[in-house]
Amino acid sequence: MVVQVYRQVLKAKKLDKIIVAIDDKKTQIELKKFSVPEVMTSNFHQSGTDRIAEALKDEDTDIVVNIQGDEPEIVPELIDNLVSLFKNSDTEMGTAVTSDLTIEDFKNPDVVKVKIDEKGLAVNFSRQPITGDRIFRHIGIYAFKTHILKKFIGLPPSKREREQRLEQMRALDNKISIHTVVTDCKGRGVDTAEDIKRLEIHYAS
């Protein structure tokens, strides 16, 4: 799955460098079989964002895109659109949302829902149903200005972050704005065994 994510990411046009951050020797052995470059990080990180920060400690960059390894259907153009958010100097952090949100998704706690305002800023994330308008399904990709990433990992987990098990709540609870790219992409992350079966069928066909 990580190899498939990597292959999709390679197709993006606005990334200068791709790093696969891992914490397991078995993963490292498998990635070498496919010539995927990786960086070994600590296995004590509480979140993927903390891992990304370690992987980038020796890199000189202004913008960081965190593409989660359980998003094998990530669309390369979506990555580029997310990077383009930072043409606006006010953008501190960005993520992607899709209108492909079914009734089943709405009820499923494994599917994260996002509410955005008229300006395209995320105002709430939830595993539970959200009421109101402009509700979307979240896609597991984030982008940060580097100094915002450093600020983020220096903050303690917020109450809502712990309750929801959603690290992006730490940003909202500390007044870090999250801009969104709105799409109709149907690609989905892998959260359950059923998701894996669906992908195996898809790639076998």
Image: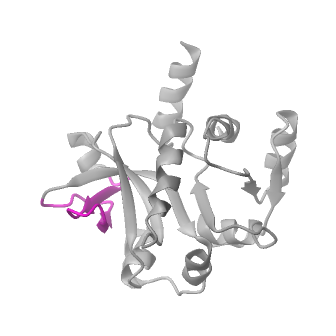
Q: Is residue 74 visible?
A: no
Q: Position of residue 147 (x, y in %)?
A: 60, 79
Question: Magenta segment, which residues?
Answer: 109-132
Residue 125, magenta (yes or no): yes
Q: Is residue 4 above or below residue 202?
A: below
- What residue appears at the point 48 percent right and 61 percent down from the top-left corner? 87
Colour logic: one colour
Query: In which quarter of the view is residue 160 placed?
Result: bottom left
Q: Is residue 101 left or right of residue 186?
A: left
On screen, residue 100 above or below 203: below
Q: Quadrant of the N terminus?
A: top right
Tell me, yes or no, if residue 101 can be seen here: yes
Q: Quadrant of residue 168?
A: bottom left
Residue at image coords 54%, 86%: 155
Please identify the residue farthest to the top as the structure is shown. Answer: 205
Total residue callouts = 0
Residue shown at 61%/65% (left/top)?
63
Where residue 140 sits: x, y (%)? 48, 52
* Above or below 82: residue 104: above
Residue 33 in the magenta stretch? The answer is no
Is 101 situated left or right of 25 in this image?
A: left
Decide whether the magenta segment is chiefly helix, strand or loop: loop
Measured from the top left, where is residue 200 in percent x and y? 56, 24
Q: Is residue 8 above or below residue 96?
A: above
**Which residue lies at the image location 75% right of the left edge and 56% below the top edge?**
22
Q: Please state the horizontal and vertical placement of residue 52, each as a whole percent of the image.
A: 67, 65
